Image: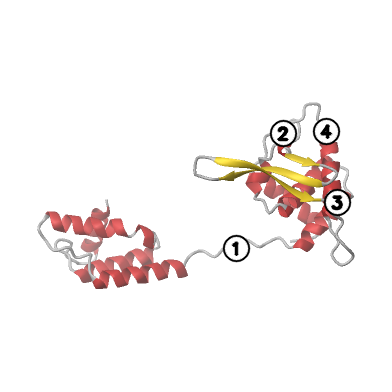
Amino acid sequence: QHWKAFAKWCAQNNCEALPASTEAVLAYVGHLAEASKTRASSLQPYLSSINAVHADQGFPKPAIGHLIRRVRQGFARICTSTRPRDTRIPLPAEAVVKVLFFGLKATAVERLRACYALVLTWIFLGRQDSSVALQATDHGITEHAIWLRLQEKTTRCSGTRRVIRLPLTEGNDDVPSLLPLVAKLGRRYTNARARHSTITPPVFFQLEGERKPTTATMSSWIAYALKYVNVA
């Protein structure tokens, strides 16, 4: 497949594919870089196929040597400089605090859920996919702490379940803690959820009659909560 692509490019650019010159290989690598269809880490199969065909036919391998190494280094720099920029914007603490106080004034279970899902995910530095899949038995609020039972990967195929607790301290005059208010919001959502459902779904942020939430669902909750506190 890679050899056919090289041979086709040579035919289109009036270059000899077999035997090919090192200059032709360098030009082909430049073509791959401009096309942005190949990363530096996946360039080797292209070069190996060219060398293999030449070796099979008794010709010197054209895709080796100092010039090839240098052009590969340049290819890697091009890929790095043109890598798509991460456009995600961190959610500032001020916005989370606004959502927290907005949620404490809410009575509808859907609004309580949207606010608590955002705040809980933020304070535990969680991901959207872990929050939407959170089981009701893996979350709790005691007199002294908010806790989550989280899955931590140890290898590709296994993991360890660990309980993480955030203590409900009041803080001090200089640095007051908002965690007691987060716990208050969590209790309000939990109680409203229990009143809303005759059969409580196992997923913590799922209400009776709903499908299991997804990351897209979580995104809609975040957008909903931020809209009401005027955070774009």
What's the residue type where badge 3 is placed?
Pro
Task: Evaluate if marks 4 and 1 touch, with contact meaning CB atoms under 8 Å apart.
Answer: no
Give the x, y percent position of residue 141: 81, 42
Residue under numbered circle 2: 210
In depth, the one of 150 and 111 nearer the eye is: 150
Task: Evaluate if marks 2 and 3 touch, with contact meaning CB atoms under 8 Å apart.
Answer: no
Give the x, y percent position of residue 210: 72, 33
Q: Quadrant of residue 68?
A: bottom left
Residue under numbered circle 3: 180
Pointer 1 local density, CA inside 10 Å: few below 14, some 14–19, many at least 20: few
Of the two numbered discs 1 and 3 on the same chain, state the one appearing first in sequence.
1
User: How far apart are the alpha carbons under marks 2 and 3?
Assistant: 30 Å
What's the residue type where badge 4 is placed?
Ala
Label 3 SS: helix
Taking the spot 86% from the left edge, 61% from the top edge, the residue there is 176
User: How far apart are the alpha carbons under marks 4 and 1?
Assistant: 38 Å
Residue under numbered circle 1: 87
Residue 24 as seen in the image, left or right of residue 159: left
User: How far apart are the alpha carbons under marks 2 and 4?
Assistant: 14 Å
Taking the spot 57% from the left edge, 63% from the top edge, the residue there is 86
User: How far apart are the alpha carbons under marks 1 and 3?
Assistant: 33 Å
Residue 8 is at least partly visible in this image: no
Taking the spot 73% from the left edge, 38% from the top edge, the residue there is 204
Of the two numbered discs 2 and 4 on the same chain, state the one appearing first in sequence.
4
Which tag is nearer the camera, tag 4 or tag 3? 3
Q: Which mark is residue 194?
A: 4
Task: Evaluate if marks 1 and 3 touch, with contact meaning CB atoms under 8 Å apart.
Answer: no
Q: Is residue 209 above or below residue 46?
A: above
What's the residue type where badge 2 is placed?
Glu
Give the x, y percent position of residue 4: 24, 54
Pointer 4 local density, CA inside 10 Å: few below 14, some 14–19, many at least 20: some
What's the residue type where badge 1 is placed?
Thr
